[in-house]
Image (tube, rainbow, N blue to C red):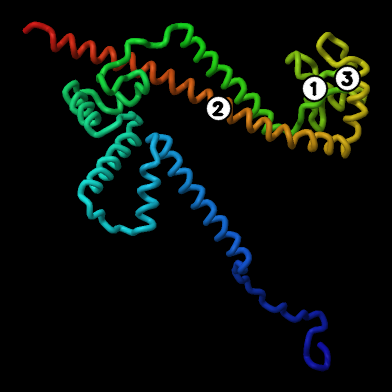
Amino acid sequence: MDEQGCLPCAVSPSPRTYWYPQILDFNSITTITSWVGLLATLSTSFIFLLISIRTKSFHVPMYRLWKLLHGTEEIEDQSIKKLISDETSLMHFRFMYGIQLKNLTECHRLINWSHEKNIEMVSIARCGVFFDPITCAVRNQMPNFPRLFFLMIIMLTSIVITSFTATTMMSDGAILKLKESQRYFWLAPDYARPLWPLSAIALSTETCNGTSAPQARKGDFSIRDQKILCDLLEKSEGLQTIVSNARAPQQWLASTVLLIAVYFGLIALSISRNIQAARVLKKRLDKIDMAANKPT
């Protein structure tokens, strides 16, 4: 011990540390509020656009806008009030089932017919354009085999394009072209592969380092192309810059192609489902008519 009675190796206890929760500053709160407001505006606009597309009318957005500007004040004129009420009911029917009828009289006739035939309104709506809501019957002119085959080709093409573009967007490479041989190839940070044929052997860093023998098969890179690409693969920093610069515009192009492929694929799928639903409904109606006309 020293003169003060303390151990020479004693260490004074460290001060306690407390954890305080982080508090968002004003700028962070303002940014979050702006994003929330933007998201709410875009969501509302999307909902109104969906309603307008579904109903083939701007009645609901205009009606809600009028309510927003003038409040819940009731319309005094009874004729106009009934007209707007009937139009709103018609838009509700159109939005729910997607059946484009012109007035409530046609709606009531279709509803009564569905009750008489014991047919669900959803089954009618699934037929799409292949059901005539005015005559309450399945259309006789159904797509023939060539049109069905064309729809199948569209769906298969959409699936192939969607798969290819999605894989391209998730990968870390880009499509480039050799200036000398005018050949397109896929370039990644550690390998290069010709786009066609699919069985072509990729040129990797191991091949360039002499670990594997150079390939000169038909469809693979030529010896001259291999030398150019090997020089490129050895430059890791410059290679990453080249891939990044080529990848950015190709990502936008791939996104556009992906959306177009998904759009046409969904349309073809929807038409195919409508055809199948119309055939099923046609069989049900034939059975109902046969049972009704069967002598007792």
Name the one closer to the observer, 7 or 93. 93
Q: Residues within 10 Å of mark 3 (few under 14, many from 20)?
A: few
Q: Are marks 3 and 1 in contact (CB under 8 Å)?
A: no
Of marks 1 and 2, the one in the foreground? 2
User: How far from the left and from the top, in percent, is residue 263?
Assistant: 53, 27
Q: CA distance from mark 3 to mark 1?
A: 20 Å
Q: CA distance from mark 2 to mark 3?
A: 41 Å
The residue at the point 25 percent across, 19 percent down is 135
User: Which of the 4 image quarters holds residue 256?
Assistant: top right
* Viewer can see residue 61: yes
Q: Secondary structure at mark 1?
A: strand
Q: Distance between the Cα atoms at labels 1 and 2? A: 26 Å
Q: Does residue 172 sit above or below 40 in this rendering? A: above
- Picture disc at residue 185: 1
Q: Which residue is mark 2?
A: 262
Image location of residue 18, percent across then percent down = 63, 74
**Sequence order check: which comes first, mark 3 or mark 1?**
1
Image height check: is 41 above or below 134? below
Q: Quadrant of residue 98?
A: top left
Q: Residue at x 37, y 23 (%)?
A: 128
Say which amino acid is labelled 2. Answer: Val
| Disc nearest the viewer among 3 and 1 | 1
**First of labels 1, 2 by sequence position:** 1
Q: Is residue 278 left or right of residue 271?
A: left
Q: Circle 3 is placed at which residue position?
A: 212
Answer yes or no: do the residues labelled 2 and 3 have beta carbons within 8 Å? Answer: no
Q: Is residue 22 visible?
A: no
Q: Of the two numbered discs 2 and 3 on the same chain, state the one appearing first in sequence.
A: 3
